Image (cartoon, rainbow, N blue to C red):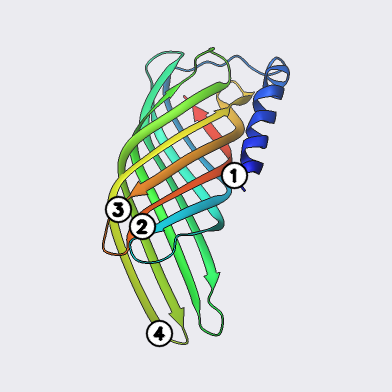
Amino acid sequence: MFRTILLASVAVVALAPAVARAGYDHERNGLYIGFGIGGGGDQERYQNLPDDDGAGGVGNFRIGGALNRTVALGLETSGFTRNDDVPAAGTLQRSATVAAFGVTVFPAQNGFYLRGGVGFGAVKAEYRDAGLTLSGSDHGLGGLFATGWEFRLTPKFALGPQVEWAGVAVDGDVVKSVGWASLTAQLTWWW
């Protein structure tokens, strides 16, 4: 999964300049709102259990404002979830989320960007089997880093791919940390 995300990000960065020449100018002033959806893989580290990894769904949301054409500040969120069937038992659903103060930088003043943030993170697990539900959650430090490209479809709307790495350091009784890498389609409105 990580290899696929890396290859996709290299392809996006290599092809993006040619596609971007045909679009609108990258005007960034005022507020923005955006979200993304896609998939990825996680790595879960436990205190007294074997580490685990798997594939799942990813979603994110962001809102903020541009300081100028190259820097924007805002609230960045990212969440990962996956469901695993437990043989001869039930279903185990795991999720992790990050809510962070983030900075987005557009170094070349085109569609390419780097985004990062640090803030709050939470993890949750829920086991279900024939009417029985067991759940637990914990919280800790969360962070994220992303890179991608905005393709302007209108002067105020952009669509593009994003590669993101996010994680939560819990260091709780059961879970130590959860980290995930993802490839998502991003939609962003500027006004």
Q: Secondary structure at mark 2?
A: strand
Using the image as rendered, state which of residue 23 and residue 146 is in the foreground: 146
Q: Which mark is residue 182?
A: none
Mark-to-mark CA distance, 2 and 1: 21 Å
Q: Which residue is mark 2?
A: 123
Q: Going 59% across and 28% down the picture, which residue do you hit?
A: 158
In front of the other: label 3 or label 4? Answer: 3
Mark-to-mark CA distance, 3 and 1: 23 Å
Q: Which image quadrant is residue 134 in?
A: bottom left
Relative to 162, is 79 above or below? below
Q: Going 58% across and 42% down the picture, which residue do you hit?
A: 184
Mark-to-mark CA distance, 3 and 4: 26 Å
Mark-to-mark CA distance, 2 and 4: 20 Å
Residue type, mark 1 in image: Phe
**Sequence order check, earlier mark of 3 and 2:** 2
Q: Mark 1, residues whose alpha carbon is within 10 Å: few (<14), some, or many (≥20)?
A: some
Mark-to-mark CA distance, 1 and 4: 35 Å
Q: Which residue is mark 1?
A: 2
In front of the other: label 2 or label 1? Answer: 1
**Sequence order check, earlier mark of 1 and 4:** 1
Q: Which residue is mark 3?
A: 170
Q: Going 54% across and 12% down the picture, which residue do you hit?
A: 108
Q: Which image quadrant is residue 66 in?
A: top left
Residue type, mark 3 in image: Val
Q: Secondary structure at mark 4?
A: strand
